Image (cartoon, helix red, strand yellow):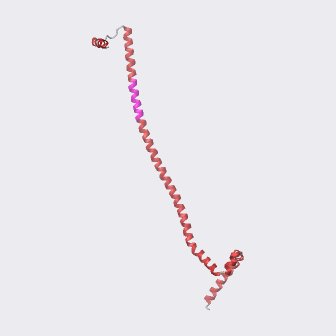
Amino acid sequence: MSKEMQELQKQWHSVVQAMHSNSNVVAFMNSRVGQYLDDHPFIALSLLMFIAMSAIPVAFFLIFIVITAIMACIGVIVMEGVVIAIGGISLLCVLCGLGALSLGVSGVLSISYVVLSTLVNYWHASRDQIRKQEVNGSLPQKSSSVLDLSANNGKNE
């Protein structure tokens, strides 16, 4: 054999010796499963190959889970932002509507106040004028056409 092959064999032998001297490996090999796998090398090799080949799909699955969880968190944050934005716009619309309604109502109430106060002032002014005329003794006389109409109304009834 060549020197390279002998050197490779020595390295392999040292790796196997290091593995067999590990306390965890010794405890596993002394267990029932370890003894069974030692007695059935084909099953041990099949199990080793299954574990080695399933490591990549399991790793991809775990990466998929982590990425999905991250995307779900980002999606929740984005969705929450969208919901808050829609709620804020709705609140803005409602407040603008209430502002316009309050302006309209206050305008109607202001106009009503001005009209009613003018009517009340006119009514009080005319009553005060009639009282002053009663006190002075100069009541305005009803016109004759008004008297004729009231007389006609009395005859018709």
Image quarter where the C terminus lies is top left
Q: Is residue 111 magenta?
A: yes
User: Whole-percent x and y of residue 156?
Assistant: 30, 14
Q: Height in image: 61 above or below 139?
A: below
Q: Quadrant of residue 55?
A: bottom right
Q: Quadrant of residue 57?
A: bottom right
Q: Nearer the viewer, residue 133 or 150?
A: 150
Taking the image as shown, residue 156 lies to the left or right of residue 59, namely: left
User: Whole-percent x and y of residue 35?
Assistant: 70, 78
Range of residues picked out in magenta: 104-117
Magenta region, mostly helix, strand or loop?
helix
Number of on-image labels: 0
Q: Quadrant of residue 20?
A: bottom right
Residue at 40%, 28% (x, y): give it: 112
Q: Nearer the viewer, residue 39 or 7?
A: 39
- Which residue is the extreme one toward the top? 137
Taking the image as shown, residue 25 lies to the left or right of residue 93, namely: right
Residue at 45%, 44% (x, y): give it: 92
Q: Is residue 37 magenta?
A: no
User: Whole-percent x and y of residue 103?
Assistant: 41, 36
Residue at 38%, 10% (x, y): give it: 134
Q: Height in image: 5 above or below 135?
A: below
Taking the image as shown, residue 155 lies to the left or right of residue 75, namely: left
Residue at 65%, 81% (x, y): give it: 41
User: Whole-percent x and y of residue 81?
Assistant: 49, 53
Q: Height in image: 152 above or below 41?
A: above
- Which residue is the extreme one toward the bottom? 1
Image quarter where the N terminus lies is bottom right
- Which residue is the extreme one toward the front? 157
